[in-house]
Amino acid sequence: MRATAAATAALCLAWALALVLAYPHARNGPGMTPPKLPGASHGSRCGAETPNDTDTLRRCADDGAFDAVTLDEKGRMLFFKGDEVWKGLHGGPEPINATWPELGSGPVDAAFRIHHQDSPEHDSLYLLQGEQVWAYADGKLRSGYPRAIGDEFKGVPGHLDSAVECHVEECQAEGVIFFKGTHAYWYDLSTGQLKERAWTQVGNCSAMLRWLERYYCFQGLRFLRFHPLTGDVPRHYPLDARDYFICCPGRGHGYAARQNATLYALMDRCSGMPLQAFTSDDKGRLYAFRQSYYFRLDSQRDGWHAWPIKHTWAGLEGEVDAAFTWENLTYFIQGAQVSIYREDRSHAPVQGYPKRLQDELGIPGADAAFICPGSTLLYVIRGARGWGARAGRARARGGGMGTRTPGSH
C-alpha cells in the first residue's frame, strides 16, 4: 500500500513538474520566444527609440491621451488616438482604416475584447464610434456589422467615453462596463440586463482596459485601478500611464528596478532566481511565487508581470513556502501556519485564518504541496519526508482538510 502511494505521489509530482516546465524559463533558449510584456513594466524592452524620435515624442507628449485602449485577439495592446492606432509598446502609429477599413476615420470612442473561455474561436474585438459598433474576429469584420450600439447592447447609449469587458471570474458574470461621463453601466451578456452603477471613486474614463485580471480607468494620461464590482480604487492612484503602459525613455515603474540587479532579478520571471511555490487553480490559472511576488504562467498571450502577492490575496504577506488549490480554495503555507482564500469569490480570505498548520493538516511545515487532478489526496513534502492527507469536505466556514494520514514514503 505504501509503495502504491509512493508511486502515485511520484507520478503526480512528475505531472506537476511537466506542467511547470512546459513554460519557457530561458530568455532566448532554442525554439523559445521571448516573453511578451504589453505594459511598460519590469524587464520590458522598449526598443531603440531616443528621446528625440518623432514617434516617441508624440507617444510620450503631455497631451498624448488616448481615445481607447484594449488588447486584440492575439494579446497585443492597442492605443487609439484620433485617426491612428499604436500597436504595442513602441514604434509609430498607423491609420486606423489600414487595419479596419470598414471603420473609416477616427476617433474610436471605445474598444474592448470579448473572450469566450468555452469558445475561444468566437473571440471578438469591438470598436465603438458614435451610435455604431463594429465586431472583428481575426482581423475580419463579422457578418451583420456594423450595428447600432443599442441593438447589440440593449439600452446602452451611443457616443460613449469608454468600455471594458468584464470576466465571470472577477464580475460573477460575463459582461461589459460602459462609461459616459460620470455614469457607469453594467451590461450582462447572458441576460441582456443593463444596470447603472453608483460609483463615486471612478468616473470620466476617457479609456478603460482589462489586463491580467486588473481593471483600469484612464483619465487623460492619468489612470486608476478599480474593482469591477464595487468601483473601489486602491490607495496611491491616480498614476501616470507613461510610467506603466507606454514606453518612454527614462520613465517607467520598472526603470528603477533595472538599475538594481537584485530587485530586477526578483521581478524578472526569467532571471533564474528560485521560485518558492507553484499552484494551479480549478480555472486553469497557473501561479508561481517568488518572495513577496507572484507570476501568472498561463498568460503568455496577454503578457507577463510580477505582482505583489498581497494585491491579489489581501492580507497575505511575505514568502510562500507551498501552495495548493482544492475545490475552489487555495491554501497558502507560510512557516507553521496556513491561510485559505476562495478562488470563486475574487480571492476573498476565508474567515478564521491563518491557523496553525499542525492543527489544520497535522504537519509542522512544508516545502511543497500538490493535489493531482481529479484526486482528493494531498501530498506534502518537507525535506526528505512526504505526507499524504485525504481531503475531506470543507467545513461550514469553507476551510479545513479532512482525515490526516501522515506517513513517510
Image: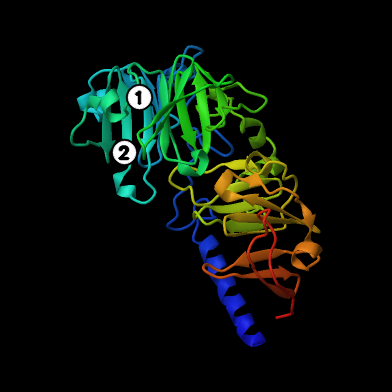
Secondary structure at badge 2 equals strand
Where is residue 238? Give x, y as percent: 60, 21
Earlier in the chain: of badge 1 and badge 2, it is: 1
| Residue under the image location 44 percent in, 50 percent down | 33
Q: Nearer the viewer, mark 1 or mark 2?
A: 2
Residue furthest to the top: 63
In front of the other: 234 or 321: 234
Corner quadrant of residue 8: bottom right
Asked if 103 appears above or below 121 in the picture, the reply is above
Check the image and tell me how it is coloured. rainbow
In this view, 353 is above or below 75:
below
Residue in the picture at 55% in, 29% down: 244
Q: In the rendered image, which residue does mark 2 sit on?
A: 124
Q: CA distance from mark 1 to mark 2?
A: 18 Å
> 44 and 146: which one is in front?
146
Q: Does any portion of residue 51 appear in the rendered image?
A: no
Q: Quadrant of residue 25?
A: bottom right
Q: Please, which residue is most extreme toward the front here?
A: 396
Label 1 Cα neighbours within 10 Å, binned few <14 / some 14-19 / many ≥20:
many
**Amino acid identity at mark 2:** Ser
Q: Nearer the viewer, residue 105 or 376?
A: 376
Please state if 346 lies on the left or on the right of 178 as rendered. right
Q: Which residue bears the numbered disc 1?
A: 85
Q: Quadrant of the N terminus?
A: bottom right
In the image, what residue type sits under mark 1?
A: Val
